[in-house]
Image (cartoon, rainbow, N blue to C red):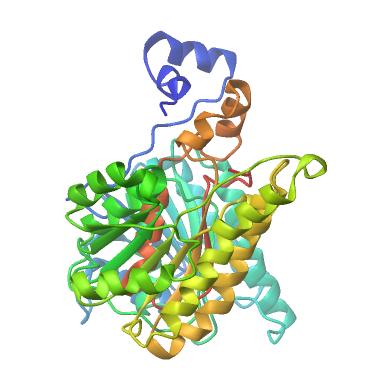
Amino acid sequence: MTDTYLHLVNSGFTKKLAKQLGLPRPAPLRRHRAGDPLVDGPVLVIGLGGQDGASTPQPDADALAQLLAGTGDTPGWDLDIHRHVATTETVKAVVLVLSDVEHPDGLAAPVAALAAVLRRLAPGGRVVTISRTSTADDAPAVAAARQGVDGFLRSLAKELRGGATANGVVLAEGVDVLAPSALGALRFFLSTRSAFVDGQLLEIGSDAGTFPADWEVPLSGRVAVVTGAARGIGAAIARTLARDGATVVVVDVPAAGEALARIANEVRGTALQLDITAEDAGQRMLEHALGRHGHLDIVVHNAGITRDKLLANMSRDRWEAVLAVNIAAQLRINEALLTSGDFTDQPRIVSLASTSGIAGNRGQTNYAASKGGVIGMARATAPLLAAFGGTANAVAPGFIETEMTARIPAVTRQIARRLNSLQQGGLPEDVAEAVAFLASPAAGGVVGRVLRVCGQNLVGA
């Protein structure tokens, strides 16, 4: 659905009028297109000493800068990397390397260096922090500094304008700053693939993961199943996985067969008409993938329904229908995959949760319970896949422009669009990009996590 307001406040007379009246002026977001450069301009890498901290050891920042620029022994990304910038120079991205911080005092110099260049951050720019997890085993000062990065990053994201975003890569203890998943997450956050991901910190739990032979088609040779793929977010996921090189099996109910066939033809995959609540749904998915494509590597649980009512007015049938489709079916399908012996080659399970499952939403107790259940399921399923080099994770969309949100009353819809840091709704492809990243080989160290795609807001969708 088109956001007419966004277009009006970015064109002609209405743009000037909106500025004079102090109205929200969301910036059009630049989204990924094939052939786009990773970052089309200068990238500033700041370590603990800031831009003038030559006397402060910055091993992680130095190593990262070398790799990103391609000046070290490891093949790099050939970005235009700077450790210092002139006072008039525009920057497209800033990487703030805080993985070595051991005391809150240590944040002052790098944060001051970032503050000095924020006004020169280009529209649609990126700020990415690299930090470490805070645990109960840390010294109090270390824990304070590491947890402080969390609050700093989330607050900074709310201050940026012009479609710029701020996100964080959080390394578990022992994970190297150059680990495949650390770099994979950094690449995702720097790129236009993460246009509607803002204010998020993604933990990298291990050094697992591998670099794809080609970053443009990281899923080459992989076979993926996407449920609920006939329209909306599911169709966008199928298109994005296919763009990234995967062979895609699209799944939806028989009633959506015609639309499903169109998507299958578009992505050059195959279609499977199936009610995912059937007892044998997992086995039928596996048989289709093995029979038609030889193997199955990625399963995206996207299919879901809503039956909204205030709890006082909700029938048991409404409750049970939502839980059956949104979580019970996924549990049954996962069990079939895990016990089959045919889902063992670095498998990926990515489930669609929702910000409703994190923050709750009025009139959605059943939906929120199911989506909260998805988050718990992903966390508990991940260890079961670890022996095969696999992962299970969840993506939690916020307000996304779909047929579902188009049915929200007009005024409520406008308010929901503006209640995030980017002041607009996301698009189905924004969710699809996050799913594709978590399904990629470079996300092997992201285990049991939830990645919100919500423009930095907690509004049920």
Quadrant (top left/top right/bottom left/bottom right) for the C terminus = top right
Q: Is residue 98 visible?
A: no
What residue lies at 52% left-to-right and 72% top-to-bottom? Answer: 332
Q: Is residue 207 above or below residue 232?
A: below
Is 396 located above or below residue 256 in the figure? Answer: below
Residue drawn at x 70%, y 72% is: 144
Q: Is residue 272 above or below residue 332?
A: above
Residue at 33%, 74% in the rendered image: 286
As rendered, which of 140 and 250 lies closer to the eye?
250
Quadrant containing the N terminus is top left
In this view of the protein, can residue 356 be seen by the observer?
A: yes
User: Camera-side residue: 409 or 231?
Assistant: 231
Q: Nearer the viewer, residue 345 or 425?
A: 345
Residue lying farthest to the bottom in this orientation: 387
Tell whether 136 sits left or right of 158. Answer: right
**What is the total number of numbered labels drawn onto the structure image?**
0
Image coordinates of residue 86 in percent, x first then y, are 35, 49
State whether residue 293 is above or below residue 303. Answer: below
Extreme right residue here? 312
**Residue 293: horizontal and vertical position, in percent?**
19, 71
Q: Position of residue 422 (x, y in %)?
A: 51, 38
Quarter-wise, where is residue 402 in the image?
top left
The answer to whether residue 342 is left or right of residue 306 is: left
Q: Position of residue 125 (x, y in %)?
A: 39, 46
Instruction: Report the front residue among 280 and 237.
Output: 280
Q: Is residue 68 left or right of residue 373?
A: left
